[in-house]
Amino acid sequence: MSEILKVINKYKDQLINEDLFLGDLYFHENGRLNIDQDAFYFFKKKINKICLENYNSELELKIEEIFLGVYFDRGTYRHFVAVGDDVMVLLSYEHRNENELYDEEYPPINVLNIIYWEDIQSIELEYRKNGHHIMRLKLNGGKDIEDVYNVLISTGIGGHHFGAESYSAYKLLVKLFNDIIDASNIIKLDETTEELQQLIKDEHYDKLLEKIELLNIDKVITEYTYHFFRMQAFHGKEENDKALNEADNYRRLLNKHNQEHNQEQKFLLSNLYIQAYLHNEDSLNSLKWLNQALQLYPKLNQAVGLDFIDEIHSEMEISYEILKREFADMPFQKRKFIFMSDQTLYSEMEGLIALKTNDPPENIKFPLAHPQLNEVYTSHPNNDRSYIPLKDYQKELFVDKLREFLLLLDVLGATKIDVINKNRNIDKNERSSEKNIGVKASYKSIGANVDYKNKKNNEDQLERELNIAFHQKLSPKKAPYIPEGLIWFHTDINWQRMAEQRMNGSLMSHREIITSKQIESLSSHELTKVNVELNALFAKANVDYQKDDLSKSKSEIHYALEIQVEFEDIDNLKQVHTNTPNTHLDSNQTSKNNLDKYKDDVLFMLEDDGVIDEVERKLLNRKIEKYGISINEAEQIEKELMFNNDELKYLEEYKLLLEEGVIGEIEERMLERYAKRYDINKERKNILERSIIKN
């Protein structure tokens, strides 16, 4: 059904029940205007006669395409109005009897006004005390349009065309016409959108930019549509920074007109940013605006569309999958904190990212039994792929550094290690309690026979709390070496100098103090920001937020331990440490000549069509056996020759998805996005995927 017909049907009862409409009203029923057909053709004939005399052309009026008709007989003057999808025709003519004589100098008056909805911006009512109110046209602009409507602009539209004599009748007509104009703009915008989408489909991006500028000048399209299609054009031209700039421009426009708080405008802005960041493959910002769109949509004055919500959730799943893959490669400051949730959420805080507890990125590490739901983690200062519970941050880092130092001492040939509790600064409440019972700070060696006289053994408690062996005797056999995988060692100059002395054989004992204050800690400002953001995240996840949990991370508890170590004489350590050999491809077992021969064979097979068919596969398999090279080596050579770097990257993504299970709808959409990124067309995409399946 036509949008304009829907508007007229909406007003139908009001028009019929309006007492002061003196004209006869005709509505569109059963596929045509419900008027006597002979009467309609009489009006049509009169209209076209005037058109031929004045414009040298006829107006195509069909009874099936007229949605509202009005006939008003005022005796001498009669009026007919026809309202259709594109046009409103206003006919006024002087009626005389056939036998009535008249002077040729004064023929019957025939007036025709034609109003095209696309030319009209709005219709405004001008009130007059004498009751002869006027409906004024407000045009879209342009001198050509003004010339066409010159007479009508000066006179306005009178109510006599409709038999309207009351102010309320005029108001109803103006409301009806303005709704028709709005509906006409929707129709035109839909048609224009189809045309613009076709230009995108045909990849005519420069033509699209030219067209959109003309439409914008003529005020045919909305500001949103203007920026949306410019964004599509820039994306097609691989100018994604410009695409993002279109969303920024639209945001500035909303701020300029003070519409940043308008829910509908915010929703449209969200859609622009979603498109921009999806084009740029920025998964983190995509999730931000997808979340915002999901939150805004129910607040709009329309029913929530399940298809839209499903589409948003689908895009969120895809963006989250991309976020997982790219997470560890993101700048450290963007992912310094993570919050584990049971749903896909977005954090407004720069540096805090929400991840799914049951689906975290595979290339980051957590402590044993972690991650846990609704827990906050922060990255290790010396290993940004390792995450620690924020509330245990200080203690965990201290223990981590202590354990690494003990390991280093072990492989450097330690025979005895003692860990001594130097002091323990505790929080204010514990400190005041300690003063009340008269406990004094002291230096005590862990493991020594000390009589505490039933007092609380502070060192034993500390040993249990840190879960560290505080006294060790060792029997080294291997010569000193520096193990792989150390984290703190490479940032501590004292450790490095101690290790260098030990490797040279001159060091026999060493004393080191490790304090938790030496370890990088989080600022109060950072923790305050995290606290504020967690309030919002817990609210989104419908979880009660207890600030006390996080406040523990800024506890005043600090540890200070002295490590005393004695080493074995280096001359007694004869066994040399050797790294476990890597089990790589057996490339050492094959000669370079055979690999080169196989490379030539593959090139020969690819010369005709660029692919290896079934027969060629069998021949190459024989060559692999003949040359004694491995399957892995053969596959590597084939890939290097068959596929360019971008295609190899696509194959890696495809293999990862295959390993996770069946390629479903979401995975396929991810693959289409990767294909676009690597400039791989659909036909080539299918060839690449078949090459993996065959292997």
Image: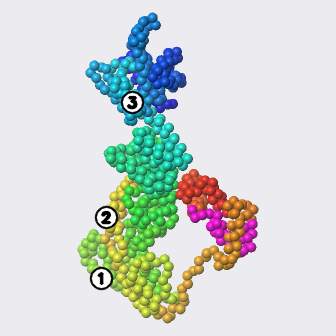
The disc, 2 or 3, on the residue closer to the chain's N-terminal end is 3
Instruction: State the residue position of label 3.
Output: 147
Q: Secondary structure at mark 2?
A: helix
| Residue holding disc 2 | 525
Quadrant in the rendering for residue 341: bottom left
Q: Which mark is residue 35?
A: none
Q: Is residue 645 magenta?
A: yes
Residue 112 image position (x, y, % from top left): 43, 21
The label nearer to you, 2 versus 3, is: 3
Earlier in the chain: of badge 2 and badge 1, it is 1
In the depicted structure, whether residue 111 falls above or below residue 536: above
Q: Label 1 belongs to which residue? A: 442
Tell me the quarter of the picture where residue 222 sits: top left
Q: Is residue 686 above or below residue 224?
A: below
Left or right placement of residue 247 versus residue 649 in this view: left
Segment colored magenta: 619-646
Determine the residue located farthest toward the front in the rendered image: 105
**Spatial separation of the CA atoms under disc 2 and disc 1:** 35 Å
Cα–Cα gap, marks 3 and 1: 100 Å
